[in-house]
Image (cartoon, rainbow, N blue to C red):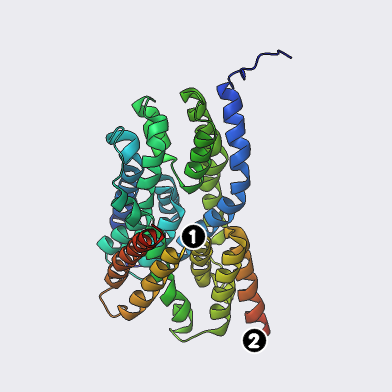
Amino acid sequence: MTASPVKPPLSPRKSYQRGLIDGLPFLLVVAPFAMLFGALATEAGLTIVETMGFTIVVVAGASQFAALQLMMDNAPTFVVLTTALVVNLRMAMYSAALAPYLSAAPLWKRAMMAYFNVDQTYALSFAEYERDPALPLANRIAYFAGVSTPLCPFWYFFTYLGAVLGGGIPPEYAIDFAAPIAFLAMIAPALKTVAHVSAALTSIILALALAWMPSGTGLIVAAIVAMTVGAQIELWMERRRA
Amino acid sequence: MIYSTAEIWFIIVVLGVGTFLIRFSFLGLMGGRRFPPWALRYLRYTPVAVLPGLVAPLVLWPDATGGALDPPRLMAGAVTLIAGLISKSVTIAMSAGAATLYGTMYLLG
C-alpha cells in the first residue's frame, strides 16, 4: 500500500463495473415492465416486429404504455403522439442536468448517452457525478455505460419475451388492468410534495370532467392545467417559505 | 385497433425521434446553456400531470366491464397506489396491486 494522500484515479473499467453493479437492481423493475409492454402490445394487435420497433426506437416505458393505451382506444394519431411526448418532456430536465458533466464528450458519444438517457440511468449517473465532481470524463462515460448495460438490452429482451409469451392471454386474467396498475405504481412514488399531489388531483378531476371531449384531447387539456397547478403551487410554497 | 401498418410505424418513428430530441436537447444541441427556473418548474410536473388523468377513467370505467364500476379493479387500484406511497417502490406497488386484483376476483367469483 502506498502512503500517498492522493487517491489513485479510478480506471474507467472500474467505473464501468461500479455502474453495472449500481444498475443491476433496477432489472427487477425493468423486467416485469418490459414483459408487460410486450404482452399488452401483442394483445392489442401489434405484430412482434412493431412491438420491438416501439421498444427499441422509443425506449421510454411510461410513454410507451401511454401511447399503447391511447392506441387501444383508437385515439387520433396526433393525440397519441402529443400525450406520449408530454410524458417524456421531463427527460429534457435530465439532459440539462447531465450536460455540464458530459459536454466535453464527442458528439457521437453524447448522442449515444442521449438515447440511453432514461429515468434510471439519469438518476444513478447524476448522483455519481455529484458525489465525485473530480471524476474524469472517461470515467463518467464509463459509469453511464455501466448503468445502461443491465437496463437497456434487457428492456428489449424482456419485451420480446412478453410479446412471444403474452399473445392469447385469456380474458379471465384481466390483463386489461395490467396497464392501469403499472401507471399507478409509477405515479405513487412520484407524489413527493403537495405540489405533485395537487397536480395529480387536477389531472384526475379534469380528465374525468373532460372525458366528453373528442378522443383523448381532454387529457391533453387536463395535463396542461395540472402542470400549471403544480408549478404555481411550488412557486407559492417557495414564496411562503421565504 | 384501427391503425394501418404505416400509421403504426409513423407513430413509432415520430415518438422515437421526438423522444430522442428531448433527451439530446441540452446534451447535444444547446451546449452549456441552462434551463430558466420557470421552465424547470413546469417540467418537474409533467409525469404527474399526464399519467393520473390517463389512468383515472381506466380505473373507474374499465372497458372490460362495459364501463361499470368494478370492485376488484377499484380495490386493486387503491392498493397499488397506497403500496406505492408507503414503499416508494414501483415493483412492490405493482405486485401488491396484481395480488389484490387476482385475490378479489377469486373471492368475489
Instruction: Name above or below for residue A216 compared with residue A156.
Output: below
Chain ID at mark 1: A
Residue at 36 percent of width and 66 percent of height: A70
State yes or no: discs 2 and 1 in contact (Cβ < 8 Å). Answer: no
Q: Let me know if residue A137 appears in the view.
A: yes
Rendered image quadrant of residue B107: bottom right
**Which residue appears at 28% of the width and 64% of the height?**
A79
Q: Is residue A36 left or right of residue A54?
A: right
Q: Secondary structure at mark 1?
A: helix
- Residue A155 in the image: state x and y as whole percent: 52, 47
Q: Quadrant of the C terminus of chain B?
A: bottom right
Label disc, if present, on residue B108 of the rendered structure: 2
- Residue, far right: A1
Q: Is residue A84 above or below residue B71?
A: above
Q: Quadrant of the N terminus of chain B?
A: bottom left
Q: Which mark is residue A190?
A: 1
Q: Nearer the viewer, residue A93 or A211?
A: A93
The residue tagged with tag 2: helix, strand or loop? loop
Q: CA distance from mark 2 to mark 1?
A: 32 Å
Query: 10 Å neighbourhood of mark 1: few (<14), some, or many (≥20)?
Result: some
Query: What amino acid does circle 2 point to?
Result: Leu
Give me the residue at 39% from left, 67% from top: A199
Tell me the amino acid under the disc marked 1.
Answer: Ala
